[in-house]
């Protein structure tokens, strides 16, 4: 099951990165970044990267407050509007202690675990994903065309707008499956790992410990 936040957050970060790359490049751009995209500048790239990473951290906090974005979904029914979104969206409190001046208004911070993951998405969206656009630019130059299409006036076609999004979508899926999605282990898989990785003495110790745990649980139920 997935929630809307896992789609909207990565997509929003690409949009934010594009917008601020343009703004920083327009107002501060002096140094060309890559020949494939003559209008790209180092100033725009760096400014957009910093802005995107900060935005990822803050945007994850804002989105994580709405259940219609965080509730897991299986279908288009309305039951998913109310749920327990899980520990990923429950704030954890970090005390700043004496590391901040006495006049500082916040003595502790409430940060959702999803915000730490959002930093990884923001880092990818700002540093790696733009190369999807660079690749698309090189592809168009090779075929001597300006845009892939003309369905969006002034912006080309859908592919011209989605080049970075496609790279980001692949990364977001792999990251989610690797670091966020719960892993399902069957009894057969666990037993196989025990037999492969534990010595005979360790297996015997595990067996004895499990026996004691089951015995204590039975006594507790009686």
Image (cartoon, rainbow, N blue to C red):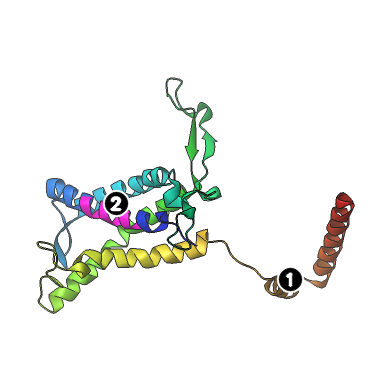
Query: Residue drawn at (52%, 49%), measured in percent from left and top?
Result: 83
- Assign the magenta stretch its main secondary structure: helix
Residue 103 falls in which quadrant of the image?
top left
Query: Residue drawn at (81%, 69%), measured in percent from left and top?
Result: 203
- Compared across the picture, whether 156 is left or right of 48 comes to left
Nearest the eye: 144 or 149: 149
- Horizontal and vertical percent position of residue 79: 49, 54
Q: Badge 1 is on which residue? A: 194
- Compared across the picture, whether 186 is left or right of 46 comes to right
- Compared across the picture, whether 188 is left or right of 11 comes to right
- Horizontal and vertical percent position of residue 165: 29, 63
Q: Is residue 123 visible?
A: no
Q: Considering only order in the chain, which callout, 2 or 1, is on the residue closer to the N terminus?
A: 2
Q: Is residue 133 above or below residue 58?
A: below
Q: Label for residue 49?
A: 2
The local crowd at label 2, few if under 14, some if 14 to 19, many if 20 or more residues have their Cα within 10 Å, is: many
Query: Residue drawn at (38%, 59%), measured in percent from left and top?
Result: 7
Disc 1 from disc 2: Cα separation: 45 Å
Which residues make up the magenta segment?
10-19
> Regarding mark 2 in the picture, which secondary structure is present there?
helix
Instruction: In the displayed orientation, state which residue is furthest to the bottom.
Output: 143
Nearest the eye: 35 or 72: 72
- Horizontal and vertical percent position of residue 125: 33, 57
């Amino acid at each position: 099951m997935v929630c809307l936040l896992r789609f909207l957050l990565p997509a929003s970060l690409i949009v934010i990165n594009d917008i601020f790359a343009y703004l920083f490049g327009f107002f501060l751009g002096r140094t060309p970044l890559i020949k494939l995209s003559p209008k790209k500048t180092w100033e725009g790239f760096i400014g957009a990267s910093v802005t995107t990473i900060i935005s990822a951290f803050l945007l994850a906090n804002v989105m994580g407050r709405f259940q219609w974005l965080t509730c897991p979904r299986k279908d288009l029914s309305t039951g998913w509007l109310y749920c327990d979104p899980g520990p990923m969206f429950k704030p954890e409190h970090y005390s700043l202690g004496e590391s901040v001046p006495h006049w500082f208004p916040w003595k502790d911070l409430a940060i959702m675990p999803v915000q730490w993951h959002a930093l990884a998405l923001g880092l990818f969206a700002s540093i790696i994903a733009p190369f999807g656009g660079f690749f698309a630019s090189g592809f168009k130059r090779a075929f001597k065309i300006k845009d892939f299409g003309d369905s969006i006036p002034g912006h080309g076609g859908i592919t011209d707008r989605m080049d970075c999004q496609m790279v980001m979508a692949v990364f977001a899926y792999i990251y989610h499956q690797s670091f966020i999605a719960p892993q399902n282990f069957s009894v057969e898989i666990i037993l196989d790992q025990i037999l492969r990785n534990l010595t005979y003495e360790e297996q015997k110790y595990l067996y004895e410990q499990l026996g004691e745990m089951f015995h204590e649980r039975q006594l507790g139920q009686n």
